Amino acid sequence: MENFVKIQVPVTISYPALEHVLKQQLVGEYIPKPSEDSNESPYAQILDVGLAGSSSGSGDIILRVRIRILRTILKRDNVDLYVQATPGYDNDTQQVYIRRFNMEAQTSSRFYNSSLEVLVNRVAYNQIIQKARVNVQQIIAGELTKANGMLETGMELKGLKLNGVVEEVRVQDITPKANRMFLSLELQAKVEVDVFDLSELLPA
């Protein structure tokens, strides 16, 4: 007889691994991105991206975006933007994304900071935040392969032996910590249950 069971699997992802993906997606991008329909020059170009956990313990991450300002009025060589962000997870696309954010610039000029923040926030959501999505499909696929390998040979749990296949994987929770990000996966499997020791199932 086949039954559906749910298996909870904790997964950790290091910030350097996430940062590597973000660098590939963002470094070199212009803000705003040049368009064939517009002759408008970009405000800035993204030079580098960094990612770390927040020390505030609020479950946020800190995204650092180094940009070069290209417009004459606010022209400077390099400026660091710091984004305090709350991550979320989209089970349909299997992507970690930024759900809420607050962006600020850090230079020696308060006026320049304010002007730059207004300027960047006009385009930051579409150019930076929307693109700062990390696909964790390969990580989830690895956990799926391991789970199916255990179920294929038989997974023993307190007097039971489960054989079957995982049919669905969903992320139930995402928790950023100081040095890495934790994902709580729920695997739904169709299994056959073989009871080989009833004494293990009885209350003590």
Image: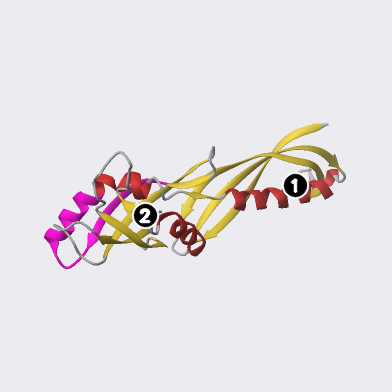
User: In terms of secondary structure, where does tag 2 sit?
Assistant: loop
- The residue sitting at 76% across, 41% down in the picture is 165
Which dot marks residue 76? Answer: none
Q: Are marks 2 and 1 in contact (CB under 8 Å)?
A: no
Coordinates of residue 49 in the picture (x, y in percent): 39, 61
10 on left or right of 16: right
Which is closer to the viewer, label 2 or label 1? 2
Distance of mark 2 from mark 1, alpha carbons? 40 Å
Which dot marks residue 148? Answer: 1
- The residue sitting at 38% across, 54% down in the picture is 60
Q: Nearer the viewer, residue 186 or 104?
A: 104
Q: What is the crowding at mark 1: few (fewer than 14 residues within 10 Å), some, or many (at least 20)?
A: some
174 drawn magenta: no
User: In terms of secondary structure, where does tag 1 sit?
Assistant: helix
Examine the rendered structure and indicate whether residue 66 appears above or below residue 96: below
Which dot marks residue 29? Answer: 2
117 drawn magenta: yes
Q: Which amino acid type is marked by label 2?
A: Glu
Coordinates of residue 96 in the picture (x, y in percent): 48, 48
Q: Name the image quarter holding the N terminus.
A: top right
Q: How is the image coloured?
A: secondary structure
Residue extending furthest toward the top: 1
Magenta-tinted stretch: 98-120
Examine the rendered structure and indicate whether residue 55 appears above or below residue 188: below
Q: Quick check: can you spot residue 125? A: yes
- The residue sitting at 66% across, 53% down in the picture is 142
Coordinates of residue 9 in the picture (x, y in percent): 63, 50
Q: What is the crowding at mark 2: few (fewer than 14 residues within 10 Å), some, or many (at least 20)?
A: some
